[in-house]
């Protein structure tokens, strides 16, 4: 079975109560020892002082080098857009990528894909919401407004939970894709790993990695039904998280690598869409940035009723 990497989690506790019961000879030792008499160390191997209120424990997460496809890893690494480490920043809230620009495309020889063009901007805003982070494990919701015509719109979206539900039910199909890493073909793989987004790095720099199954949400009635092939997308997001005392945190040095692994809904209609360049071919990948603009929290404008209430 593939071994998974270990990152380090901090838990703040009451030194007076917890340390006395869990560690032996805490009051007599300059550094903490565990119940086996071994020194407790941080992620860099440094001993923890006996009066520390921070306990370091291990947290098991997938190894990004096995969990993610080689193509994404190799090209993002060439851009310097991978940040390794066991102490990533804590990121929370919704962020908008409004100026997405295609820095690199890696298309398969059979691909005719036309919607992503290297050196060109991508229309529409990308919304990413991060929450429930416990050190290197978190949740990520994605939403993108799609507007094929005036007064007609729908959302392309995914959540970690919806991705898990779909891939758990279609895992045999997922394993058969040529681009699926060998990591998932091990008989001991647990699909629960699809339930999360994973984050590594050394704050303020971070790298997130996760899978998505994209689906359509139709909040309004449309005269047509957008094709919903449920593409499976591998994602690596990297950047620098800048905290602000006024709550206006932002993300700079933003890179987002994506690769189409396959589709849940297959058939002649999908094959025709791929042939016509409307959908990415199996294995197509692209890396975008936000053209130097930071990702910020969206500003919610008050509606008319709220404005009137304040007058």
Image: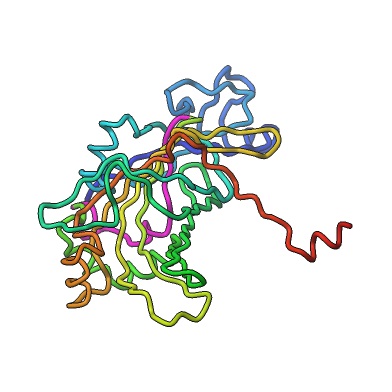
Query: In the rendered view, would you say 15 is above or below 220?
Result: above
Report whether 17 appears left or right of 204: right
The count of marks equals: 0
**Residue at the left extreme?**
109
**13 or 130, which is in the foreground?**
130
**231 or 219, which is in the foreground?**
219
Query: In the rendered view, would you say 280 is above or below 205?
Result: below
Which color scheme does this rendered protein use? rainbow
**246 or 210, which is in the foreground?**
246
- Image x and y of residue 264, in percent: 27, 70
Q: Which residues are magenta?
A: 182-202
Report whether 288 appears left or right of 17: left
Residue visible at 53% across and 46% down in the picture = 134
- Image x and y of residue 200, in percent: 42, 38
Report whether 90 appears left or right of 245: left
**Residue at the front extreme?**
150
**Residue 35 in view in this figure:** no
Report whether 92 appears left or right of 247: left
Residue visible at 55% across and 20% down in the picture = 31
Query: In the rendered view, would you say 260 is above or below 81?
Result: below
Q: Quadrant of the C terminus?
A: bottom right
Which image quarter: residue 271? bottom left
Residue visible at 84% across and 62% down in the picture = 308
- Image x and y of residue 17, in percent: 69, 37
Residue visible at 24% across and 37% down in the picture = 75
Asked if the magenta segment contains residue 207, the reply would be no
**Residue 283 in view in this figure:** yes
**Residue at the right extreme?**
311
**119 or 62, which is in the foreground?**
119
- Image x and y of residue 125, in percent: 48, 53
Asked if the magenta segment contains residue 199, the reply would be yes
């Amino acid at each position: 079975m593939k071994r998974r990497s270990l990152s380090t989690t901090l838990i703040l506790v009451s030194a007076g109560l917890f340390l006395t019961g869990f560690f032996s000879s805490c009051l007599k030792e300059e550094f903490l020892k565990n119940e086996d008499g071994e020194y407790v160390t941080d992620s860099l191997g440094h001993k923890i002082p006996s009066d520390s209120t921070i306990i370091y424990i291990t947290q098991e997460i997938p190894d990004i080098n096995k969990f993610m496809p080689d193509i994404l890893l190799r090209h993002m690494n060439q851009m310097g857009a991978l940040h390794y480490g066991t102490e990533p920043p804590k990121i929370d809230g919704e962020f908008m990528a409004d100026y997405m620009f295609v820095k690199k495309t890696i298309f398969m020889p059979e691909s005719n894909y036309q919607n992503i063009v290297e050196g060109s901007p991508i229309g529409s805003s990308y919304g990413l919401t991060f929450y429930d982070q416990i050190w290197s494990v978190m949740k990520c919701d994605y939403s993108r407004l799609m507007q094929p015509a005036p007064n007609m719109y729908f959302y392309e979206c995914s959540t970690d939970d919806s991705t898990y539900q779909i891939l758990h039910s279609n895992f045999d199909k997922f394993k058969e894709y040529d681009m699926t890493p060998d990591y998932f073909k091990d008989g001991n793989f647990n699909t629960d790993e699809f339930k999360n987004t994973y984050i590594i790095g050394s704050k303020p720099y971070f790298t997130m990695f996760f899978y998505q199954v994209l689906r359509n949400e139709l909040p309004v009635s449309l005269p047509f039904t957008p094709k919903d092939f449920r593409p499976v997308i591998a994602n690596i997001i990297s950047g620098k998280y800048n905290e602000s005392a006024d709550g206006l945190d932002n993300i700079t040095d933003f890179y987002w690598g994506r690769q189409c692994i396959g589709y849940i809904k297959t058939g002649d209609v999908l094959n025709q869409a791929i042939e016509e360049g409307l959908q990415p071919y199996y294995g197509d990948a692209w890396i975008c940035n936000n053209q130097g603009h930071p990702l910020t929290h969206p500003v919610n404008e008050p509606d008319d009723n709220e404005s009137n209430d304040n007058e």
